[in-house]
Amino acid sequence: MAKIELAQLLDAGVHFGHKAHRWNPKMFPYIYAERNGIHILDLIQTMEFLKRACDFSKRASEKKQTFLFVGTKKQSASLIAIEAQKCGAFYINHRWLGGMLTNWITIKSRIDRLNHLEEQEKINSFNSLPKKEAANLKKELEKLKKYFNGVKGMKTLPDILVIIDQKREIIAIKEALSLNIPIISILDTNCDPDLATLPIPGNDDSIRSIKYIIQNITDSICLGQQSSLKT
């Protein structure tokens, strides 16, 4: 596992929180100081929490548990897709549809529909249809890809959720909590640590901060997969 160091966290800007007036008082234990009206997170704690999350991810991966990464911010969407694919995890990086977990049977039917249409497209079945019907099916396919491309291989509910922005993904979090699915979550200073199984205090706005944290988690998942192959 890559060594997590304070200098790297500092360089990635993981310590920068939100403006002090936007804070959640529950984050007080993880805040080091206030500078120019901005809360600064305690990177020593962040380092320890990130190590715990990485260790948890590695052990879960060794047990072949599945991960679903949820990050629908535009600036981090491509990063989430790349990192999730790197370790064979699932991802939602465009929009979380309500019921993705709690209404799984319906969602699974949409995923099955996506896979069916992709198969039909692959064998050029659309070419034999009337133009209007083919156009409608292609339009439907593109829409399904937009929402479900990152989960089209997901056969059952995920074992673990990885959340990038708690405030933005609150619906996903509530669904996971209702189903007792563990949550690894980056927590900025405006977040609620009670809503995360494995919190990682950190900057959830900076792409460099998000990248550093998520890469450590996906690297740990990959290590767990490699370890399970040796046993």
Image: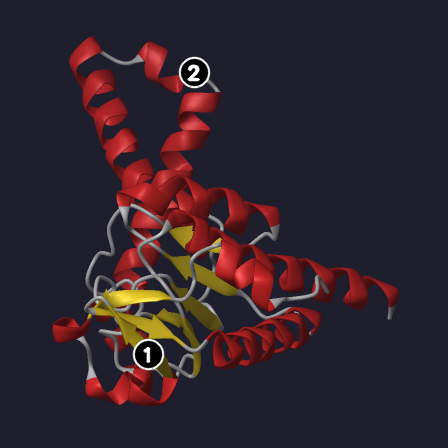
The residue under the point 71% across, 71% down is 62
Q: Which quarter of the image is occupied by the C terminus?
A: bottom right
Side of 226 where 107 appears, left or right = left
Residues marked 1 and 2 touching at CB (< 8 Å): no
Amino acid type at mark 1 = Ala
Which numbered circle lies on residue 105? none
Mark 2: which secondary structure? loop
Side of 231 where 147 appears, left or right = left
Q: Which quarter of the image is occupied by the N terminus?
A: bottom right
Res. 87 in view:
yes
User: Residue 109: x and y, percent?
Assistant: 31, 53
Side of 223 where 8 appears, left or right = left
Task: Give neighbour class at mark 1: few <14, some 14-19, many 20+ (Cα, 10 Å).
Answer: few
Pointer 2 residue = 124
Q: Quadrant of residue 175?
A: bottom left
The residue under the point 40% across, 66% down is 15
Mark whose residue sits in front, 1 or 2: 1
Please name whichever residue, 45 or 179, is drawn nearer the observer in this view of the structure: 45
Please name whichever residue, 200 or 172, is drawn nearer the observer in this view of the structure: 200
The residue under the point 87% across, 65% down is 230
Task: Give neighbour class at mark 2: few <14, some 14-19, many 20+ (Cα, 10 Å).
Answer: few
Amino acid type at mark 2 = Asn
Side of 199 where 176 appears, left or right = left
| 166 in relation to 115, above or below | below
Please name whichever residue, 117 or 18, is drawn nearer the observer in this view of the structure: 18
User: Residue 53: x and y, percent?
Assistant: 55, 75
Pointer 1 residue = 33
Please name whichever residue, 23 or 213, is drawn nearer the observer in this view of the structure: 23
In terms of sequence position, does the residue under pointer 1 or pointer 2 come before the other? 1
Mark 1: which secondary structure? strand
